[in-house]
Image: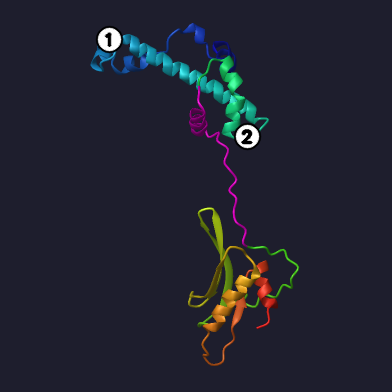
Amino acid sequence: MIDVAEQQLKVPIRKSSTPNHNGYEKEFPHIGLARLCGWFGITRQAHYQYSWFCYSSDIEQKLVIEEVKRIRLLHRRMGTRKLYEMLQSFMIDNQIKMGRDALFDLLAVHGLLVRKKRRTTITTNSKHWFRRYPNLVRGFTPCGINQLWVSDITYWKAKQQFFYISFITDAYSRKIVGYSVAENMESVHCIQALKIALCGLRPQGHFKLTHHSDRAYSIVVIAMYNY
């Protein structure tokens, strides 16, 4: 390990058999090491052993980081578990003892953990062969209820299962006038939500109601449904 450290890290380890202890000497120049150790109930030997352990651990960690960076040049997306397997022979050759959890912590401190690509649930598919209707509400601001309804689909994850919620909202009052919950995104559930909204529609004289959607496949099919 000493040879590898001197070559890769440019650290002249052999020139100094013990770590530098000038830190406490600068803080307490008039107090000897034996007296300081006595205050904390430890021996000078224990102090030197711990200091050398920290020094050796620091060298080992730097060696592992350098090896991880070398591997990542060839495998940029390699996770920590596979890295740990590849590092086994390297750590054995250099007499480095480090568990998988310790490797996780070390890579996290140095910002070398690979972020997992978060898989999102897709609820909108605008690339379909159905007729695309013009946008009738561009620049339109409703001044009352039942002038503009907006359809959308969202999802709710419960344990290991997704539930899809098709709902229709009145653009003026922000009230959900119709909804349907299902385990899939079939268009029949969007139609069911629209039926519920229409059933709750009360006659309020002459008005023009526009139903708007984001052109998703499941919602566009509503336009093909004959009411």
Observer able to see residue 147: no
Q: Residue furthest bottom?
A: 205
Q: Residue 137's image quarter?
A: bottom right
Q: Residues within 10 Å of mark 1 (few under 14, many from 20)?
A: few
Q: Position of residue 192 (x, y in %)?
A: 59, 75
**Quarter of the picture holding the N terminus:** top right
Q: Position of residue 193 (x, y in %)?
A: 57, 74
What's the mark number on residue 54? Answer: none
Q: Is residue 104 magenta?
A: yes
Range covered by the magenta-colored residues: 98-123
What colouring style does the render use? rainbow
Q: Is residue 188 above or below residue 65?
A: below
Residue beneath disc 1? 34
Q: As rendered, which of 182 and 81 lies closer to the eye?
A: 182
Q: Amino acid at mark 1?
A: Ala
- Alpha carbon distance from label 1 to label 2: 49 Å
Q: Amino acid at mark 2?
A: Met
Residue beneath disc 2? 78
Q: Measuring 25% from the left and 15% from the top, which residue is drawn there?
A: 41
Q: Is residue 11 magenta?
A: no
